[in-house]
C-alpha cells in the first residue's frame, strides 16, 4: 500500500498548516511573496492527490507509522480527493481576491490575522475530508469552527463581532453534542475508526442516543433548517472572501461527516422514516431559505439565505440515497456529489461577485444596485453565471446535479421530492432576478467607487468552472464514485 | 452500580445541568462557563463509560486530552471575541438576547 505518492495525503493537511505557521510568525496584511507560493504548493499537492486517487483508487495513510486506534489514520477516497482539490482551488480564488483588495480593506488591526486563520481553515477542511475515524473528524471540525469564527471577526464591525459570537456558541454546542455521541459510540463498540465500524451499528439504546446527538450536532453545524439561525448573519457580515469560503466549503464539512456516518456504519439504522425526515427538513430549508432570500433587503444576506436553501437540496437527496432502487440510489449519489461541488464553485463566485458589486455602490442594499449593470458588467456577468448553476439551468453543474436528483426521485416514485426540486428552482430564479431587476434599472450617475478588475476576473473564473462542471461532469463523477459507500456504490463501481 | 456507570451518570447529570444553564442565561461569559461544565461532563462519560468491561484503555484518555486542549482553545477565542464585542458596544449579551 505504501508507495511514492502516498505521503500526498498528509501533505494535503501539512502544506496549509505549514503556511498557517509561516504567516503567523510575522502577521502582515498583504504578504503576496509568502502567500502565493503557499497557494501554489497547496494546489499542486491537491491536484497530485486527485490524479493519484483517480488512477489508483482509495488510498490510506497511517500518520507516523502508528496504526489505529492510537495513531491517526487518513484515507483518501474519491469524495475526499475531489473536495481537497475543490478546497485548494476555491481558497486560492478567495486569497487572490484578498490580495487584490485596495488598502482600505486592511484598516482593521485584526486584518493581520487573516492569513494564518485562512490557511488554518484550509488545513482543517482537508483534515475533515481525509479523516478516517470519528475523532479526527471531531478535531478537524473544531479547528474549522474556530478558524471560521476568527475569520468572521476580521471584518471588524460590531455586526460581524455579534455574528461571530453567535456562530461560535452554535459551533461549540454542535461539536460538544458530536463529542458526546462519539463517547457513547466508543463505549458501545470500542473503536472509532470508520473502517472497523463497517460491520454496522446495532440498534442498542446507547447507539441510538449517540446517533441522535451526533446528528443534532452536525445538523446544527450544517445549518440545516430549522437550526440555520446562526448562518445568514455570520456569512452576511464576514468579508467577501471569507463568506465565500464559509458558504462554499465550511458548512459542507459537517454534511460530509453526516453522509459518511449515516451511509457507512449507520446505514442499517437509516430506516425510511429517518431518511424521509431528513428530506422533509431539506424541503423546509429550500422553502424557508428561498423565501427569506426573496424578501431580504441586503445583497449578502440574500446570498447567505440562498446557501440555507441550497444546503436543503443535499438533505432532500438523503431519502433517495436509501429508500429507492439501486439505480435510483446511484443516480442520487451522483446528484448529491455534483451538488456539493457545483454549489461550492457557484456560491463562492456569487459571494466574490457580490463583494465587488457592494464595494462599487458602497451599499449593502439590493435596491441601491441601480445602474450597476453598465458600470460593472463583468461582476454582474459572474453573478449571473453562478446564478445559472444555482437555479439549475442547463448547461451547468447545478443543472446536472438537480437533473440526477430528479431522475432518482422519478425512478423511485417519490413525487413529493420532484415538486420540491422544481419549486426550489423557481424560488432561486425569483431571488436572483430580484438582483438583476435592481441592477438594470437606470441609476444616478457618477456615484460608483472603482473596484479592482481582478475581483471580477476571479469571480468569473469560479462561476465559469461551475458551468464547465455541467459540460464535463463525467471525469469528476467517476472520481467521486471511488470508495462510495457500498449501499449506494454497488452499481457505480461495477462490483457484483 | 459499577464505578463506570456512576461516572457516566454524573457526567450525564453535569451535561444536563450545564445545558439548562446554557439555554437559560444570556450573559456570554455565563454561557461559556456552562459550555465548559458541559465539556467536563462529556469527558467524564468518555473516560468512565469507555473503561467499562475492558479495563484501563489509553484511547479515551488520549481523546479527553485532545478534547481539553480544544475546549481551552475555544474558550480563549470566545473570550477574545467577547472582549472586543464588549469594548465596542458595552453589552454582555448578543443583540437578540438583550432585554433593555
Image (cartoon, rainbow, N blue to C red):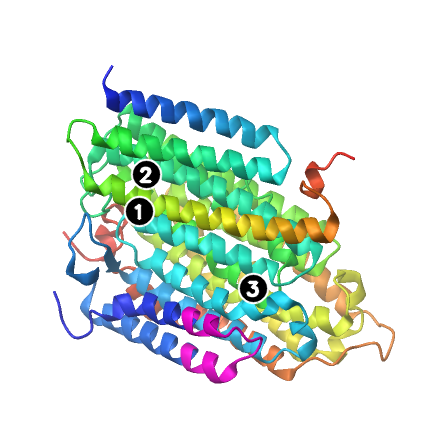
Chain at tag 1: A
Badge 3: few (under 14), some or many (20 or more) residues near its Cα, within 10 Å? many
Q: CA distance from mark 2 to mark 1?
A: 7 Å
Q: How many marks?
A: 3
Identity of the residue furthest to the left in this view? A1
Q: Which residue is mark 2?
A: A182
Q: Chain of mark 2?
A: A
Q: Secondary structure at mark 1?
A: helix
Assess whether mark 1 and mark 2 are in contact (beta carbons under 8 angstroms).
yes
Q: Earlier in the sequence, mark 1 or mark 3?
A: 1
Which structural element holds mark 3? helix
Q: Residues within 10 Å of mark 2 (few under 14, many from 20)?
A: many
Chain designation of label 3: A
Q: CA distance from mark 3 to mark 2?
A: 30 Å
Residue A2 appears in view: yes
Residue occupying the point 29% across, 38% down? A266
Q: What predominant SS class does the magenta segment belong to?
A: helix
Mark 2 lies on a secondary structure that is helix
A407 to the left or right of A102: left
Q: Earlier in the sequence, mark 2 or mark 1?
A: 1
Q: Nearer the viewer, residue A134 or B23?
A: B23
Q: Is residue A409 magenta?
A: no
Query: Which residue position holds label 3?
Result: A242
Viewer-side label of 1, 3: 1
Res A17 → quadrant: bottom left
- The spot of residue A28 in percent (x, y) is 55, 76
The residues colored magenta run A20-38
Give the percent coordinates (x, y) of residue A109: 64, 68
Q: Where is residue A348 drawn, in percent x and y? A: 54, 66
**Residue A135, numbered circle:** 1
Amino acid at each position: 500500500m505504501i508507495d511514492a505518492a502516498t505521503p500526498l495525503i498528509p501533505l494535503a493537511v501539512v502544506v496549509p498548516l505549514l503556511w498557517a505557521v509561516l504567516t503567523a510568525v510575522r502577521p502582515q496584511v498583504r504578504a503576496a511573496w509568502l502567500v502565493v507560493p503557499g497557494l501554489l504548493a497547496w494546489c499542486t499537492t491537491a491536484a497530485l492527490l486527485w490524479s493519484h486517487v483517480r488512477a489508483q483508487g482509495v488510498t490510506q495513510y497511517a500518520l507516523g507509522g502508528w496504526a489505529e486506534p492510537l495513531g491517526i489514520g487518513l484515507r483518501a477516497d474519491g469524495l475526499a480527493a475531489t473536495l481537497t482539490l475543490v478546497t485548494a482551488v476555491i481558497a486560492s480564488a478567495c486569497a487572490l481576491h484578498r490580495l487584490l483588495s485596495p488598502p482600505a480593506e486592511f484598516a482593521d488591526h485584526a486584518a493581520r490575522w487573516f492569513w494564518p486563520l485562512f490557511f488554518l481553515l484550509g488545513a482543517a477542511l482537508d483534515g475533515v475530508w481525509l479523516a478516517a475515524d470519528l475523532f479526527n473528524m471531531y478535531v478537524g471540525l473544531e479547528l474549522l469552527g474556530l478558524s471560521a469564527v476568527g475569520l468572521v471577526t476580521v471584518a471588524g464591525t460590531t455586526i460581524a463581532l455579534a455574528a461571530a459570537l453567535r456562530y461560535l456558541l452554535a459551533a461549540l454546542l454542535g461539536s460538544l453534542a458530536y463529542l458526546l455521541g462519539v463517547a457513547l459510540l466508543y463505549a458501545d463498540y470500542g473503536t472509532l475508526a470508520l473502517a472497523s465500524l463497517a460491520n454496522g451499528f446495532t440498534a442498542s439504546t446507547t447507539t441510538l442516543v449517540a446517533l441522535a446527538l451526533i446528528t443534532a450536532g452536525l445538523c446544527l453545524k450544517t445549518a440545516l433548517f430549522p437550526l440555520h439561525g446562526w448562518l445568514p448573519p455570520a456569512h452576511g457580515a464576514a468579508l467577501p472572501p471569507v463568506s465565500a469560503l464559509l458558504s462554499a466549503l465550511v458548512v459542507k464539512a459537517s454534511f460530509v461527516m453526516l453522509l459518511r456516518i449515516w451511509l457507512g456504519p449507520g446505514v442499517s439504522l437509516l430506516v425510511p422514516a429517518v431518511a424521509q425526515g431528513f428530506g422533509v427538513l431539506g424541503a423546509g430549508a429550500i422553502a424557508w431559505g428561498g423565501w427569506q432570500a426573496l424578501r431580504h433587503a441586503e445583497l449578502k444576506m440574500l446570498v447567505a439565505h440562498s446557501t440555507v436553501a441550497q444546503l436543503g437540496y443535499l438533505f432532500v437527496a438523503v431519502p433517495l440515497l436509501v429508500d429507492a432502487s439501486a439505480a435510483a440510489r446511484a443516480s442520487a449519489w451522483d446528484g448529491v456529489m455534483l451538488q456539493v461541488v457545483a454549489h461550492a464553485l457557484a456560491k463562492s463566485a456569487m459571494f466574490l461577485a457580490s463583494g465587488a458589486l457592494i464595494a462599487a455602490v458602497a451599499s449593502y442594499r439590493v435596491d441601491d444596485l441601480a445602474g450597476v449593470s453598465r458600470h460593472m458588467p463583468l461582476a454582474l456577468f459572474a453573478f449571473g453565471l453562478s446564478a445559472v448553476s444555482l437555479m439549475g439551468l442547463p448547461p451547468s453543474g447545478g443543472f446536472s446535479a438537480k437533473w440526477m436528483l430528479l431522475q432518482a426521485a422519478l425512478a423511485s416514485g417519490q413525487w413529493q421530492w420532484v415538486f420540491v426540486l422544481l419549486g426550489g428552482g423557481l424560488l432561486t430564479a425569483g431571488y436572483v432576478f430580484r438582483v438583476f431587476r435592481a441592477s438594470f434599472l437606470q441609476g444616478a450617475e457618477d456615484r460608483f467607487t472603482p473596484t479592482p478588475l481582478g475581483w471580477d476576473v476571479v469571480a468569473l473564473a469560479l462561476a465559469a468552472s461551475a458551468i464547465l462542471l455541467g459540460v464535463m461532469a463525467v471525469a469528476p463523477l467517476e472520481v467521486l464514485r471511488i470508495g462510495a459507500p457500498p449501499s449506494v456504490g454497488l452499481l457505480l463501481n461495477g462490483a457484483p | 452500580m459499577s464505578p463506570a456507570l456512576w461516572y457516566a451518570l454524573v457526567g450525564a447529570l453535569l451535561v444536563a445541568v450545564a445545558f439548562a444553564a446554557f439555554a437559560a442565561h444570556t450573559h456570554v461569559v455565563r454561557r461559556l462557563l456552562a459550555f465548559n461544565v458541559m465539556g467536563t461532563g462529556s469527558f467524564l462519560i468518555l473516560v468512565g463509560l469507555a473503561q467499562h468491561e475492558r479495563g484501563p484503555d489509553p484511547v479515551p484518555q488520549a481523546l479527553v486530552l485532545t478534547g481539553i486542549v480544544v475546549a481551552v482553545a475555544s474558550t480563549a477565542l470566545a473570550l477574545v471575541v467577547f472582549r472586543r464585542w464588549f469594548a465596542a458596544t458595552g453589552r454582555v449579551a448578543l443583540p437578540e438576547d438583550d432585554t433593555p
